[in-house]
Image (tube, rainbow, N blue to C red):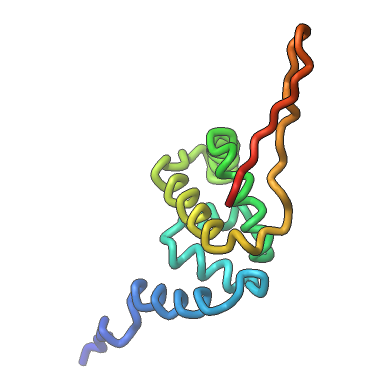
Amino acid sequence: MQNKTTPTSAPNHDQIREQNRSSTVLKPIEQWTQTDIRDWFAENYILDELRDLYQFRTGDEILDYAQELVHQLDKHRETYEDLFSKRYNGAKLPPHEFIRFAKALERLLNNNSSKLVSPIKQKPSTSTASTKQKTSTCVIL
């Protein structure tokens, strides 16, 4: 007699993601735990390896990083390509995986823009020797 397992008895990844989606969508980001953060990564189909590299502890940490990332995407991509390679024995971080992560962070930021903790840092304006005119840029979220 052979024992066979029925594949329909276990939930598939999409079912698990849908169950998780309902928990993180309903919970305010400032109340997210590490479990909620893990679920958010899964809901957005982001590599576990990326989640492990970032090691976010709170929802506010994710929002702060998202705010930084959208303004310096190339810098962060290069940094995490290097970290990914070092941590995972020379493996390359697929560009589409980083883009998926960045887009998910951007959506999260847009959905929670009223909850931002820290303001966007502005670079000091430059002035020429002939004129001392100062300029600044205002970013409205």
Q: Residue at x 26, y 81 (%)?
A: 7
Percent position of residue 67, x then y = 62, 49
Q: In terms of image quadrants, where is residue 6? A: bottom left
Residue nearest the viewer, comparing 139 with 56 = 139
Percent position of residue 32, x then y = 63, 72
Looking at this rendering, what residue extends furthest in the left direction? 1
Looking at this rendering, what residue extends furthest in the bottom direction? 1
State whether residue 82 is above or below residue 112. above
Q: Residue at x 63, y 57 (%)?
A: 63
Q: Residue at x 42, y 42 (%)?
A: 94
Looking at this rendering, what residue extends furthest in the top direction? 130
Residue nearest the viewer, comparing 114 with 107 = 114
Q: Is residue 133 left or right of residue 21?
A: right
State whether residue 131 is above or below residue 71. above
State whether residue 84 is above or below residue 114. above
Residue nearest the viewer, comparing 126 with 69 = 126
Q: Residue at x 44, y 45 (%)?
A: 99
Percent position of residue 49, x then y = 52, 54
Q: Is residue 46 left or right of residue 112?
A: left
The mark total stands at 0
Q: Quadrant of the N terminus?
A: bottom left
Residue nearest the viewer, comparing 126 with 90 = 126
Q: Is residue 39 left or right of residue 140?
A: left
